[in-house]
Image (tube, rainbow, N blue to C red):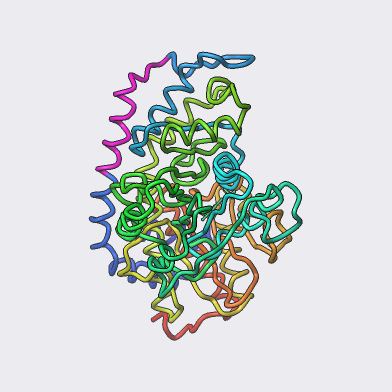
Amino acid sequence: MDRDTINILCKQYCLNEQIIKYVNQKEKLILDKFQHIDQIKEYNQYKVLKGMQESKLNSTDFNWTTGYGYGDIGRDKVENIFSSVFNTEDALVRPMIASGTHAINLTLSGLLRPNDEFVSITGSPYDTLQKVIGVQGDNKGTLLDYGIKYREIPLKNNKIDINRVINDISNTTKLLLIQRSTGYSDRKAITIDEMKIVIEKIKENNKNIIIMIDNCYGEFIEKIEPTDVGADIMAGSLIKNPGGGLALSGGYIVGKKNLIEQVANRSTAPGLGKDCGLTFGTTRTVLQGLFLAPHVVAEALKGALLMGIVYKELNFEIIPDLEDTRSDIIQAIKFELPERVVQFCRGIQSASPVDSYVIPTPWDMPGYDDKVIMAAGGFIEGSSIELSADAPIREPYFAYYQGGLTYEHCKLGVMKSLNNLYNYDLIDKNKLT
Ligand SMILES: *Cc1c(COP(=O)(O)O)cnc(C)c1O
């Protein structure tokens, strides 16, 4: 880093020079890991481009239709391209899917019928899904309310407990859910290698069981996706990885044709399925975002590594650790004190291009049981492929950092967060030198 940059960081961003030096010094220790990330990025860039070329995407596909939206060629091509990238028979990719939670809810409620059982085999699912299922909150319109049965099989030593899964499957078990990402937990993300082994074992005994993946935050981390190793259906959010920071909203569901058909019937109406529903001119940004996504995910991953090493070297526990195989873009840091979590998030917020002057505070966010603090000053509201951090205010006070459209921006986030902890005397200052 040259003197001009150090000067602007000190003057414009009120950073302590000691913090800048410390972060630059730690950055040197992770540079050798960037090559692996770049290799995956390059592969995925060509994979995405191939999908666009093969579907003969052309400039008029960005036009949009009105009314029912029958015969919307651009919408069909978006879905073809997602099928190609994720190596599936079919896809449902719509701007009306409000979030990742909505995409997962559509999938579960499209596939499950009363008395069917579904089992989460990665323990308790993500906070918002507990309300979808009905194990938290009230029961109105939840899966349990519709007579669907639900069970969880906890992880064993941070891995899917495959023997128990196979033993516990019964005649009524219709679907198994695997959550790839950490969520608000203290476990590592499930890797594709692990999923491959687990899915093969399950399919050996139970051909017809549906394996569904919550792929939020997992897209483009590796060269292949869960659907390349046998997952039947998978859902995620366009304001995370695959939207590349450009998609204005939306979610995707990819998988086997007969399954997507049922989900599409649930999303519009039986008989209408995928054939109608407007895109409101979002086709261009969805595809441009997908085109940039492999690059953006690589930037975010490099940022996660920097965040990881900077706090690890200050003696905080980090998940994943530096040498772990990453399977999502999240870097969790165990802060042990709520004040640290709050100041960390405020530091991230102050590095944002939008709402940088806003001071985030823990609040009762819809869908969550604990108070949650969220730092996000992105161009797309709530977009967590952009620089962001969040944390439920509960022990042991993990903060979850993710995103950043450019590595430089991630680095500023790292420095601003650390500077905040420094100013409030919440770190061991002796370790900085
Ligand atoms: C983000 C996320 C979801 C969905 O959350 P939304 O905020 O509704 O998009 C679901 N599962 C996991 C693991 C997630 O990270």
Q: Position of residue 45 (x, y in %)?
A: 30, 38
For image coordinates 38% across by 29% down, the residue present is 81
Tell whether position 56 is magenta.
yes
> Does residue 359 appear in the picture of this structure?
no
- Which quadrant does the C terminus fall into? bottom left
Q: Eyeballing the image, is 251 above or below 55?
A: below
Q: Is residue 307 left or right of residue 112?
A: left
Q: Eyeballing the image, is 323 above or below 169?
A: below
For image coordinates 37% across by 71% down, the residue present is 321
Query: Image quadrant of residue 267?
Result: top right
**Residue found at the very far front of the displayed protein:** 171
Q: Position of residue 318 (x, y in %)?
A: 43, 73
Of the pair 396 and 427, the residue shown nearer to us: 396
> Does residue 197 appear in the picture of this structure?
yes
For image coordinates 27% across by 57% down, the residue present is 34
Tell whether position 87 is magenta.
no
Magenta stretch, overall SS: helix
Q: Position of residue 122 (x, y in %)?
A: 47, 63
Of the pair 325 and 107, the residue shown nearer to us: 107
Q: Eyeballing the image, is 44 above or below 156?
A: above
Q: Is residue 221 left or right of residue 268?
A: left
